[in-house]
Image (cartoon, rainbow, N blue to C red):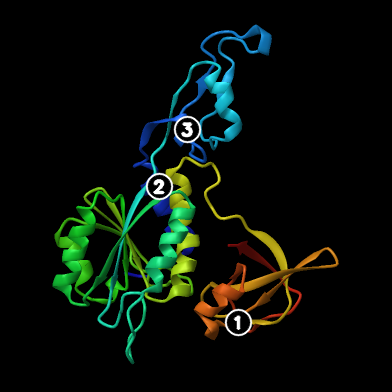
């Protein structure tokens, strides 16, 4: 399967997620920050407040805020309908992973990806279940997929799972639909998006920087679409490079640090070899187009703050 463009991958994910949105009724005290799933109008008049029957109280797709509670309480509204939080289950594949908190031996590594993703998903209002570490053999991985599918999750994150050649055929045998298996971007080219029994599967690389890029480019829009947001892509703004960037044959994302100089927004690109350490030092991702040669200092680029 050939790599598809980032824009095509985003479109496929958004279209797929749009068909699975779900709603729930919850008490207003638990609704702060949730996205309202339907319009609410005043059921009767409050002339002294200047509110008449049929006046809008809450508008669909807006976030429920503290200021809304008093208005709803004035009309006896105790519950509202909101978009349900997506439930996310995650497992990491590899024989060299060691649980965080345990002593690491030579040649081993900690599964920082799952923890980082958990915080990113929870920040966006999702429920998250970390199913732990899975051995890198086909049988163990398929068991982990089954556990994730039976966990009640809507989305399954499989970190490093698709490095195993037999995974895709095995999922196809179970009736999975593979939307794409590669995305034309760097890092994160080996990203996978699939669907199995109404569960969405995101196959992620094992590199922390790749996972952060994939989250903001593919999973962040899916979350916003699930919640009914009108603007589901991460916000971008223009900035000017403080240093040259070498172009490559595929579009890429680099970690950067933004700084205002005399009212102008500049961004310092970090060396790609810094990897996960760059994430803690930087504050944005730089979208770098494909090409040849060098994108020179003072050229404009689009950046995504994180």
- Of label 3 and label 2, which has the lower sequence position? 2
**Mark 1 and mark 3 residues within 8 Å of each other at the beta carbon:** no
Q: Where in the figure is residue 7, as x and y percent of width and height?
A: 49, 59
In front: label 1 or label 2: 2
Q: Where in the figure is residue 171, as x and y percent of width and height?
A: 19, 62
Residue 205 in view? yes
Distance Cα–Cα, label 3 vs label 2: 32 Å
Q: Is residue 206 left or right of residue 138?
A: right
Distance Cα–Cα, label 1 vs label 3: 55 Å
Describe the element under mark 1 as helix, strand or loop.
Answer: loop
Pointer 2 local density, CA inside 10 Å: few below 14, some 14–19, many at least 20:
few
Describe the element under mark 3 as helix, strand or loop.
Answer: helix
In front: label 3 or label 2: 3
- Of label 1 and label 3, which has the lower sequence position? 3
Q: Residue at x 61, y 55 (%)?
A: 235
Q: Residue at x 45, y 42 (%)?
A: 227
Q: Residue at x 35, y 38 (%)?
A: 22
Q: Where in the figure is residue 72, as x and y percent of width and height?
A: 53, 22
In front: label 1 or label 3: 3
Q: Hey, which residue is sitting farthest right in the picture?
A: 262
Residue 292 is marked as 1
**Mark 1 and mark 2 residues within 8 Å of each other at the beta carbon:** no
Q: Look at mark 3 in the image and give the residue it sits on.
A: 29
Describe the element under mark 2 as helix, strand or loop.
Answer: helix
Q: Residue at x 36, y 82 (%)?
A: 109
Q: Look at mark 2 in the image and give the residue it sits on.
A: 15
Pointer 1 local density, CA inside 10 Å: few below 14, some 14–19, many at least 20:
few
Image quarter in which the C terminus is found = bottom right
Image quarter in which the N terminus is found = bottom left
């Amino acid at each position: 399967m050939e790599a598809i463009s980032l824009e095509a991958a985003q479109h496929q994910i958004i279209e797929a997620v749009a068909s699975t949105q779900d709603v729930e009724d919850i008490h207003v005290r638990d609704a702060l920050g949730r996205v309202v799933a339907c319009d609410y109008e005043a059921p009767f008049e409050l002339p002294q407040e200047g509110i008449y029957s049929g006046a809008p109280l809450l508008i669909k797709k807006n976030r429920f805020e503290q200021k809304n509670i008093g208005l709803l309480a004035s009309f006896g509204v105790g519950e509202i309908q909101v978009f349900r939080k997506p439930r996310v289950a995650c497992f990491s594949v590899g024989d060299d992973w060691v649980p965080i908190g345990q002593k690491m031996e030579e040649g081993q590594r900690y599964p920082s990806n799952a923890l980082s993703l958990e915080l990113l998903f929870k920040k966006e209002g999702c429920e998250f279940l970390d199913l732990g570490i899975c051995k890198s053999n086909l049988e163990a991985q398929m068991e982990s997929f089954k556990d994730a599918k039976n966990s009640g999750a809507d989305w399954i994150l499989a970190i490093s799972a698709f490095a195993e050649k037999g995974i895709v055929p095995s999922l196809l045998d179970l009736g999975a639909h593979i939307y794409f298996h590669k995305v034309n971007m760097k890092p994160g080219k080996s990203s996978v998006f699939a669907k199995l029994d109404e569960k969405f599967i995101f196959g992620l690389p094992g590199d922390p920087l790749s996972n952060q890029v994939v989250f903001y480019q593919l999973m962040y829009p899916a979350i916003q679409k699930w919640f009914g947001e009108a603007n589901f892509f991460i916000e971008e703004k223009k900035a000017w490079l403080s240093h040259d960037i070498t172009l490559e044959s595929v579009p890429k994302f680099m970690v950067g640090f933004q700084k205002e100089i005399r009212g102008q927004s500049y961004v310092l690109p970090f060396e790609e070899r810094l990897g996960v350490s760059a994430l803690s030092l930087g504050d944005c991702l730089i979208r770098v187009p494909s090409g040849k040669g060098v994108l020179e200092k003072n050229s404009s680029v689009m950046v995504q703050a994180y």
